[in-house]
Image (cartoon, rainbow, N blue to C red):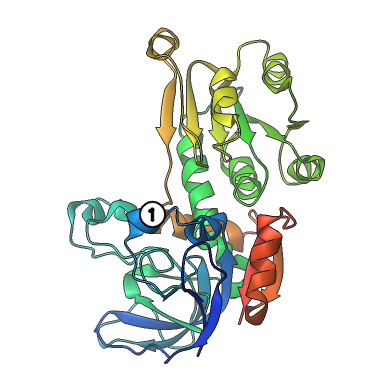
Amino acid sequence: MKAVRVIGYHQKLQMDDLPKPEVTGPHDVVVRIGGAGVCRTDLHILEGQWAEKSQVTLPYTIGHENAGWVDAVGSAVTNVAVGDKVILHPLVTCGLCRACRAGNDVHCENSKFPGIDSDGGYAEYLKTSARSCVKIDDSLEPADVAALADAGLTAYHAAAKAARLLRAGDRCVIIGAGGLGHIGIQVMHAISPAELIVVDRNPDAVKLALSIGADHAIVADGNLVQQVLDQTGGHGAEVVIDFVGEGGSTKQGIAMTRRAGNYLVVGYGENVDVPTIDLVSSEINILGNLVGSYNDLVELMALAAQQKVRLHTVKYALDDFQSAIDDLDAGRVRGRAILVP
């Protein structure tokens, strides 16, 4: 099979011909890939940012946002069958540790992360686990939803956490309306009664935000914090979700958070620098957000089937992987780039 491999950091990816993965364990599932999302984390991987954390052995196949059709199953698999359309939770988890038993499987003590620390889905086939497979509605196609497996799941996890903190009449600011943010906007519009204010540097992203559920959208400039304060009666927002996490967004995000409010950081790239006296006196909570759980993915796919969450995608043939990587790196992708074998 064709597979796109990381052969070295600060080097370009390489297409190789590899043996098709086979079922070797009772809970194994081999999936024929129908779509693999191209994520900014993949750029960070190539830059070597994940090398120490993942401890992955090179070369390996990249790609952690995957959906397709079940091609083969192990002897103990009962939740999916050959031919089923599935989206894959990005982690392969054990089901036995305390985190898994609590439904917090993203923090599984024995997990593998295909595309990060083991072979992923920039390929024609991927081996995963029955625990990672979520069947998708007949109305959905793998290439259209693949990026919901990680980008969408991460956005949903943060939005669902925010929704539990918000009431009617509250305000929520979303920083960034790009690959993750445009999903978070739709989720918040679907599940929260809060007034939704979106900020982004790109005027096109601001227009998109207004078309998919934002009540107000602001083009970010030097007066961004003041513009948000003006929009919120000088108080700031009860919740701020920062899908950027770099370029000064953390300082701005905390500055536009209301007293006793919550700043949820999703994007990463810079440090959060705030005097502790300001946290104590304002009682602002800073909450980190990782990818969501298996149950989060089930809920997100229900919203997708109801057409309440739609990915804006740009599709590339698997052979054109370098164009997808280059376009993402250059900021030419609106929404999510998807590789289609």
Tell me the residue that label 1 is attached to: 293
Q: Residue at x 36, y 70 (%)?
A: 118
In this view, the residue in front, 77 or 152, is 152
Q: Looking at the picture, how far across and down is residue 299, in whole percent?
A: 48, 55
Q: Looking at the picture, how far across and down is residue 32, in whole percent?
A: 50, 84
Answer above or below: position of 83 versus 258. below
Answer above or below: position of 228 versus 93. above
In this view, the residue in front, 337 or 77, is 337
Answer above or below: position of 22 versus 43. below
Residue 258 sits in quarter? top right
Q: Looking at the picture, how far across and down is residue 156, in whole percent?
A: 51, 48
Q: Is residue 9 left or right of residue 208?
A: left
Q: Is residue 274 visible?
A: yes
Residue 18 sits in quarter? bottom left
In this view, the residue in front, 248 or 169, is 248
Q: Is residue 44 left or right of residue 338?
A: left
Answer above or below: position of 264 versus 282. below
Give the amino acid type for the residue marked by disc 1 in the picture. Answer: Ser
Q: Secondary structure at mark 1?
A: loop
Q: Is residue 311 visible?
A: no
Q: In the picture, which quadrant includes the C terminus?
A: bottom right
Q: Looking at the picture, how far across and down is residue 70, in whole percent?
A: 45, 84
Q: Residue at x 48, y 33 (%)?
A: 264
Query: Around disc 1, counting alpha carbons within 10 Å, would you say few (fewer than 14), some (14 to 19), or many (20 or more)?
Result: many
Count of labels shown?
Answer: 1
Q: Is residue 78 left or right of residue 229?
A: left
